[in-house]
Image (cartoon, rainbow, N blue to C red):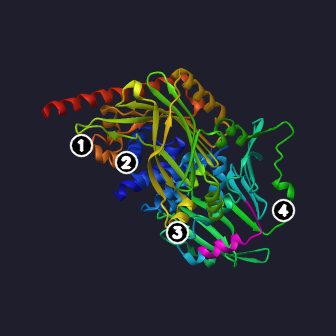
Amino acid sequence: MENICQNIQEQIPELITGTLPTEKVAELERHIDSCPACREYLEALQGDDKLLSGLAGVMRPSIARVENNVIDALEHRKPKKSVHTISVWRMIMKSRIIKFGSAAAIIFCVLGLLVFFGNGETLYAQVIKAIENARTIHAVTKSLDKGQWEKNTEVWYQQGKGIVETSWRYGEKTYIRIDNGQYMWKYRAGDDYAKRSKTIDPMGVARKLLNVDSFKKQAIRDPSEDKVVNGIRYLAYVRSNPENTYRIVTWLDEAKRVRAWEKIHLLDSGQWETYRIGEVEYNVELSPKVFTPDFGEDIEIVEVDTKLDEYFRLEDAIFTKEALGLMFAVHELARCQGDLIFAVSSIRPADTWWDIARAESGRSGVWHYGSFQFGSSWKRLDNYGRGCSYQPITLGEIYHADLQVEWTLFVPQGFETEDVKECELEIYMYNHGALAKKRAELDLPTRERFKPIAILPLPKESVALAQVMDKVYSIANELEQFVAFDRLTLKKVPFTDEEMEAWVKENPSDWIAERWLSGDKNARLSHARPSKPSQISKEDWVKDRMDCLQEIKNNYKEFLQEVKKREQGSR
């Protein structure tokens, strides 16, 4: 089981970003649905995915191929039991969309400064202490392009002022993120607006620099590569892949601070080429203008939190409950035609626990603290299997900073139509990250099932289902360009047997293929489908959700027929 979870967790980053091959999606989601550890791993990674907006251009394919081969060679980790020790290196490097994203490019390039520290805890602890004590950090990375060194990223960090992360291409800025600990701004070149919201992470890449999972093998200290720069001695640490076709040299000063690094690969000609470099300065004087969010006179500043408050203001919620350091809220509950129930719900960190968690991690994204999912509130009615429930159908989701929102349809089952006067909400709630750690230290629960968390009366009046679907689609499209993560839910399309057989022939050593060949027909892949609102027509999305609704109703009819047979057989 451990090997299965390891394979799953290594592919989850690409599932999040939509770059996972279509044939692998269904099996991953099936496993995640049944495995709490992998589901928690997915939820934690989705929080970090919010940092990867503002995509820049694609880096050189040749470099990408080399890096993928290197990572496959260097890392053969077993999965951790806790999501709080996620392999950030694997997450960043294996996901192609992450490697090519502008914010991610910053993380990737600066993260390269620490990739060779290995699991030497003493050295790593010294590096952490040295960087945390730095008053300012200035880092620049460059890549070799057609014989010229081009700036990729530039990062400024100053205690008390926050961080500025920029991506560059062809000598021009393509992306800017500023976080001063109170507000965060994001701007992508070419847009006529910049986004401002509450702070998410005022240390940004500086923290990413520190939170690298340790590797099994340490980097090798290589005095022959030592050098002196401006009178400062730089100590070299080197690591190579088993084939010795790829090397990274990282230089630390005598205070154990990263000062420079180089990535080098072996060309077909047999010569070594340095294709990426980075430099870091500490305690340099930074101009206050660096942290000023000035994107140009014609650039509108969009207040993201104000937009979200228009729809999901906590004070206007019809129900709230604090649990596990999180605040669950129901913002809207409506009776729909066809015996359906529509709900808009959210969670966010509760004020007191949020302060505690932020003190531990410095972050404010809801995915760093917790998540929730609906259950069906099923109740047994007799000994033959009959029951009543509210079967949830997710329509869409939003995540931004400290807020998670879900639009849901509930299908009442086992009720007479006139008896559905209320909706019983069952949820599973989980803590993540710093909040989970803090609550565990206090011997408090970090996950809990609430059955029910609320029983809410339904309005007598019924609204048209088409009106509800129009509203969700409209809001999702409006918010897509502003929020960190936004999707409309679509049903997965499983591979046919013929498609699976063809795929297995091409991938016989894949673990899913091995399960399929063993006769496990549940080891079936599915075709990926777009989930961002702008990529889905309203007609296609509505049809997909209605097909899902009809499938649930059909399955329930079949279930009732089986119950009736059991009842008749017992007489």
- Residue 509 placed where, x, y %? 33, 49
- Mark 2, other Cα within 10 Å: few <14 / some 14–19 / many ≥20: few
| Residue 137 among magenta residues | yes
Q: Is residue 301 magenta?
A: no
Q: Which residue is drawn at the image coordinates 36% and 59% (left, top)?
A: 2
Q: Residues within 10 Å of mark 4 (few under 14, many from 20)?
A: some
Q: Is residue 368 above or below residue 533?
A: below
- Identify the element where label 1 is drawn: loop
Circle 3 Cα neighbour tier, 10 Å, few/some/many (<14 / 14–19 / ≥20): few
Q: Earlier in the sequence, mark 4 or mark 2?
A: 2
Q: Are marks 3 and 1 in contact (CB under 8 Å)?
A: no
Magenta segment, which residues? Answer: 124-139
Between discs 2 and 1, the one toward the N terminus:
2
Residue 63 visible (yes or no):
no
465 left or right, relative to 205: left
Mark 2 = which residue? 34
Residue behind mark 3 = 441
